Amino acid sequence: MNYTFHWQPVLRALPDIMQGALVTLQIAVLSMLIGVVLAVVLAVAGKSRFASVRFAAATWIEVARNTPALLQIYMAYFGLGSLGIHMGSFAALLAGITFNNAGYMAETFRGGLRAIPGTQMRAARSLGMGPVQGFRLIIFPQLMRVSFYPMTNQMVWSILLTSLGVVVGLNSDLTGVTQDFNVKTFRTFEFFVAAAVLYYALAKIVIIASRLLAWRLFRY
């Protein structure tokens, strides 16, 4: 092996790479925030008395969980474009990851709802709360507690999924910036090792932050 390592280009490019890491984190956080809202809707829709609503929710979940995330991002970028709905690379990546997150977390929330006794809602109704108020004040906080750690795993998964943005032309995230510098310098190993370290660091930061947050929120 006669490969000579040159880390100087990586060090010079580090500010741009760190900026790409921030874009990666931004996409992951946005996809989780929107995904949680959609997942709650899907989980509740799965228990609807209307068959059409249950079918629509089940279809979303099945497609999101049983097709490749790359295909979902392609459909947002190329598929919707063929229908006249044009998205930029950032929006298509965000839409694809959000679609994926919503499908996975909907199943997590469905399990969480089943873990909450039905007597909780009946008790809320006996106190004069309506269905929406009872869900918001009684059921939803318990659901978040039950589902918190699976949501942490999904957040880490979202960070890693952002690396697929390069296939739809996104060059502002961590993988996109890394690929640009790789093309300019041909230091493939060095730049992608740096990117891997940053992805690992972002994942560990999310895990540590979630543990601290869980300790703060769920001590009692």
Image (cartoon, rainbow, N blue to C red):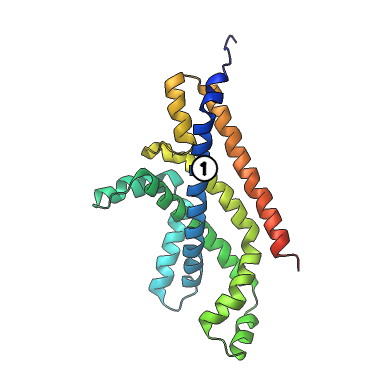
> What amino acid type should be assigned to the residue bearing mark 1?
Leu
Coordinates of residue 139 in the picture (x, y in percent): 60, 75
Task: Name the residue rendered at 70%, 54% in the picture.
Answer: 211
Task: Name the residue rendered at 46%, 19% in the picture.
Answer: 185
- Residue 120 position (above or below residue 108): below
Task: Name the residue rendered at 56%, 25% in the picture.
Answer: 11
- Residue 29 position (above or below residue 15): below
For the view shown, which residue lies furthest in the top direction?
A: 2
Task: Name the residue rendered at 43%, 28% in the picture.
Answer: 180
Coordinates of residue 168 in the picture (x, y in percent): 37, 39
Secondary element at tag 1: helix
Residue bearing the label numbered 1: 22
**Direction from residue 93 to residue 78 in the image, left or right:** left
Coordinates of residue 56 in the picture (x, y in percent): 40, 66
Q: Quadrant of the N terminus?
A: top right
Between 180 and 122, the one lying in front of the other is 180
Q: Quadrant of the C terminus?
A: bottom right
Query: Circle 1: is it few (<14), some (14-19), or many (20+) Cα within 10 Å?
Result: some
Coordinates of residue 126 in the picture (x, y in percent): 61, 90
**Direction from residue 30 to residue 7 in the image, left or right:** right
Total number of numbered discs in the rendering: 1
